[in-house]
Amino acid sequence: MRRPSYLLVCIGLALLMNACTENTAKKQAKPAGKLAFDSILGIRYQEVKRRFSTGLSFNELGFQQEPSWIIEFQSKDSIRAYSPQKDRMQNFYLHYDHGNVYNFAKEWFRIKKISKDSLLFQRLNLTKREISKDIRSDVNITYYSEDYIKNKLKTTAEALRKPTRADTAYIKKLAARSDRNPGNADSAFAGRAPVEFSTLSDMIKVKKLSTVDKLVGRTESYDYLFPRYRIDISRAYEDFGYEFSVIVDAHGKMHLGTFHTDFPENQEPRRKTLNAIINVYLSNLLKVTPGKTLEIPHSSEINLVVTGRKDSK
């Protein structure tokens, strides 16, 4: 009876020692170093997909990921990328950080896959050298080589970049929700084509303001995510100036959104004043085209700076 027990003990000790050896080897294993780009040097790749982890190009805020990059690896530490602003390819230093994390053209990426036909990157947002764990790093980018697009897929990069049926279904779902609550800012989302105003009288002027500021990281997307307009009214009943938001529903009707007052007792009087400005001036002097995404109209929130002057100057 002792021999089988002794055998089992020996087998158990052997398995335990083997597991310890494997764990030690794993701990001592060095992290992956720089990737080898030799096999893909000189191949030009077009960005064809930019998606959230949901597989969609849009999120619930209405933000759209748009593929537009063109890249070409030149060496182990240099890359060329297309600049829309300069309409040409530019050379950039390919900086290796750690793991599979690289930086070029002032952007951070985790390179997840490389082949002659395709590349897969994860776009990263860094704050004080730490990778953000939120939506800013939840972006997967797919590139196809120009040869693969043309000769194997027999299509174009422009065709591959178009929103998918899943994108359209998602936007229809968001639009339906906003239609059920047309004046609710929580149900509204940014229109990929923002609200448009057409003046119906010389009493009123409208100017769309740009919020782009590259120095603080505000890209062109801010202009449709947070639309801002200046509206000047002449021959008003009195001089005034207010900043507030409105929710423009799918039919172009404006609903008062948020506004600021210095004292709580002014909240309700201010609400009445702003509603009067919307109903008397804005609704009668402007034709409002609602924001749209994929040609689908829906509620979206916009910010207004409205001034009124009693004289016509």
Image (cartoon, rainbow, N blue to C red):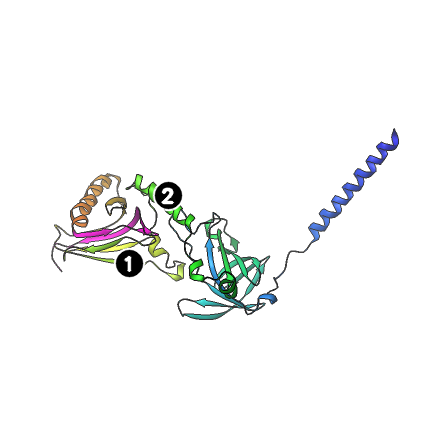
Number of numbered labels in the structure image: 2
Give the residue displayed 26% in from the left and 42% down from the top.
263
The residue that disc 1 covers is 209
Q: Which mark is residue 273?
A: none
Q: Nearer the viewer, residue 306 or 152?
A: 152
Q: Which residues are magenta?
A: 285-313
Q: Is residue 160 above or below residue 249?
A: below
Q: CA distance from mark 1 to mark 2?
A: 30 Å
Local crowd size for mark 1, using a 10 Å CA cut-off: few (<14), some (14–19), many (≥20)? some
Q: Which mark is residue 173?
A: 2
Q: Are marks 1 and 2 in contact (CB under 8 Å)?
A: no
- Of badges 1 and 2, nearer the viewer stands 2
Question: The C terminus lies in which quarter of the figure?
Answer: bottom left
Q: Is residue 91 magenta?
A: no
Local crowd size for mark 2, using a 10 Å CA cut-off: few (<14), some (14–19), many (≥20)? few
Q: Nearer the viewer, residue 53 or 27?
A: 53
Give the residue displayed 47% in from the left and 56% down from the top.
49
Give coordinates of residue 256: x percent, y percent.
Answer: 25, 44
